[in-house]
Amino acid sequence: MNESVEQIDPTNELTAETVRKKAVQGAALLTGRMILMQGISFSAMALLTVFLAPAQFGIYFVVSAIKNFLAYFSDIGFAAALIQKKEKLTDIELKTIFTAQQILVLGLIVIVFILTPLIQSIYHLNQQAIYLLWALLLSLLFSSFKTIPSVLLERKLEFNKWVIPQIAENIIFNLIAVLLAWKGYGITSLAVAVVVSSFIGLILTYIIQPWLPGIAFSIQALKSLLKFGIPYQLNTFLAMIKDDGMILFLGGIIGAPGVGLLGWAQKWAYAPLRFFMDQVIKVTFPAFSRLQDNKKELSDLVSKSIFFVCLFVFPSLVMLVLLSPVLVEIIPKYIKWSPALFALSILTITSALAAITTPLTNTLNAIGKISLTFKLMIMWTVLTWIIVPPLAVFYGVNGAALGFTLVGLSSVVALYLVSKYVDINYLQSVAKPLISACLMGICVFVMRGFFQTSIQQVISMIITGLVSYSLTIVILEPKLPVLIKNFIRRKQ
């Protein structure tokens, strides 16, 4: 029962050179496909903000936070431990993790069903919101069934296959949600979209990476995997308390409409990260887990990754701040989101800092420095709970957003600590994209003054931004075309 599953987990055959090439190739592939996927998501969100009221969005964010809270307890770092393990996985390990996870998930679902009246009372949820909660719980069960096949794909760095179910789920969810919301089904449209898309994603995952689920349990296998999994999950727990836990808490302070406005601001402020950073992070952990001893290669690749993330994230954030007031004004049904414009603007600072710190902390996890990441997460969690609630009480949505931004500024501490383990040239990786984005912002701001609020103004601002940023970054980094060419070659 302890045989190696070599036919589906040939990790020992991946040399350092192969891992490096697959990692960069995977990042490039995921970038292109995830841009398509996120483009669909944010286009759908733009339509949903027309069809749904801020209060309905607030309910969706609150219920999603409950689901994310439960998702933490359904994993206990199982997936991360399987991905990080250097040796080949065994059949007993896979089935043990599968069995343990199903027990956890089913137990959580039963508990939530029992506590539904209490949850409904605390957050003042209507019956549609309860159906949405149950739909998200069902999607959690489907996700748990996808864990093992997904882990096998990630260990082999076959992200070209891994991303197919993700894209399919994304397209199906947004199509159903927008269509039903347009027809007036409100929150129910999101519930139906969640169930249908997650079920189809489950089927596609098993088609792409066949694996026969089975029930088994080995104390030895469980203990060996949890040595890494539990510390890793503690970091995830703190992140959940810091983010989703705070959203749940704010629901009682600023109400569902306030959470809806704050959620809208966060969604758009973090949109560039979702476009340009998430796929890099997805590749980093499994790839660098197999290059833990090659610090020079690690530092070089992390530096280049941060540079290319900042290259796209920084100008996107500047354009977002300058364009959002215009778009809210020229789109009639978007005027309801105008109270969230200030929150959006200051949250972009947090987003910019995350473009730098997230790749670094993810790299620390990959090389086994989980204790340092844990200390950083403790710092961010404590600061969030100390700073955000008082500001939310006195200043509402804007106060909460300001609190998140102040916490984000503490990332300077992370940059200093991480530099002890990973050598990063911040002048090259961060300063040049930042200066170029600021200069672009000045040009776009000046151009905006020559037009009245209109679609023509939006088009002129976008063109000005593209031209001015391209010229500025090439001047500051004359070797950019060579860097891009070499980066592309390394992906091949």
Image (cartoon, grey):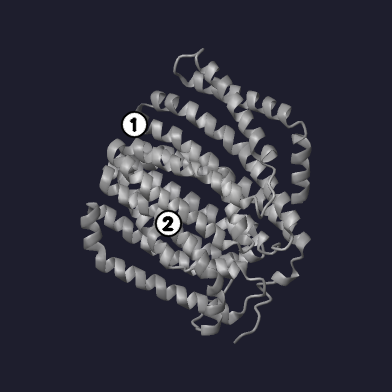
Is residue 183 in sight in this rendering? Answer: no
Task: Give the camera-side residue of 75 and 40.
Answer: 75
Task: Give the camera-side residue of 178 and 128.
Answer: 128
How far apart, in angstroms, are the residues tagged by discs 2 and 1?
Answer: 27 Å
Callout 1: SS? helix
259 sits left or right of 167 in the view: left
Residue 74 coordinates in the image, percent (x, y): 43, 68
Callout 2: SS? helix
The answer to whether 481 is drawn above or below residue 237 in the figure is: above
- In the rendered structure, which amino acid carries the disc numbered 2? Met
Residue 473 coordinates in the image, percent (x, y): 68, 30
At 39% across and 44% down in the image, what residue appears? 179
- In the rendered structure, which amino acid carries the disc numbered 1? Pro
The answer to whether 326 is drawn above or below residue 417 in the figure is: above
Residue 471 coordinates in the image, percent (x, y): 69, 25
* Of the image marks 2 and 1, the number of the one nearer the N terminus: 2
At 56% across and 62% down in the image, what residue appears? 370
Task: Give the camera-side residue of 462 and 399.
Answer: 399
Q: Which residue is mark 2?
A: 240
- The label nearer to you, 2 versus 1, is 2
Disc 2 packing (10 Å; few <14; some 14–19; many ≥20): many
At 45% across and 19% down in the image, what residue appears? 454
Residue lying furthest top: 450
Identify the image quadrant of residue 488: top right
418 sits left or right of 349 in the view: right
Q: Which residue is mark 1?
A: 339
Is residue 247 in sight in this rendering? Answer: yes
At 36% across and 73% down in the image, what residue appears? 107
Identify the image quadrant of residue 389: top left
